[in-house]
Image: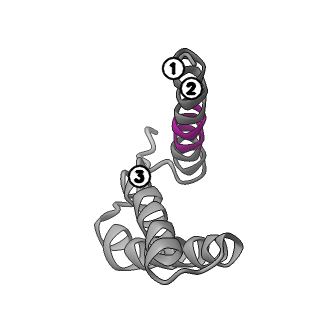
Amino acid sequence: MSILPQLIINSIIAGAIYALVALGFNLIYGATKFFNLAYGAMVAVGGYAFFYFTKTLDWNVYRAIVACVLLAGFVGYALDKLVYKTIQVEPVWYSTG
């Protein structure tokens, strides 16, 4: 059996994941006008948490997905409130008149 079909399928899957992450960056920047690089870290937190829940704790896939979404959302919310809101500067609008 040739390895080429498996390589093509793996490439499509990896490209789809990259496209979803890129769309997430675009959505966050469009809504907040702040380039938040922590989104990539939240994707990694969710991925590693899923691996931990399914392999170490032996949870089923659906339960692990729900837990990972909630965990990554909570960590992202905490980072936003504790880190990014403190360093984000409000824009100053000067009127010429």
Q: Are marks 2 and 1 in contact (CB under 8 Å)?
A: yes
The amino acid type, in three-letter code, at marker 1 is Ile
Image label count: 3
Vertical placement of 44 versus 81: above or below? Answer: above
**Residue in view at x 59 percent, y 35 percent:** 13
Residue at mark 1 to residue at mark 3: CA–CA distance: 31 Å
> Which contiguous range is marked in magenta?
15-23
Q: Nearer the viewer, mark 1 or mark 3?
A: 1
Which residue position is annotated with label 2?
A: 6
Which numbered circle lies on residue 75?
none
Which numbered circle lies on residue 3?
1
Q: Earlier in the sequence, mark 1 or mark 3?
A: 1
Which residue position is annotated with label 3?
A: 40
Vertical placement of 56 versus 27: above or below? Answer: below
**Residue in view at x 46 percent, y 39 percent:** 97
> How many neighbours does mark 3 have within 10 angstroms: few (below 14), some (14-19), or many (20 or more)?
few
SS class of the residue under badge 2? helix
Left or right, residue 47 beside residue 17: left
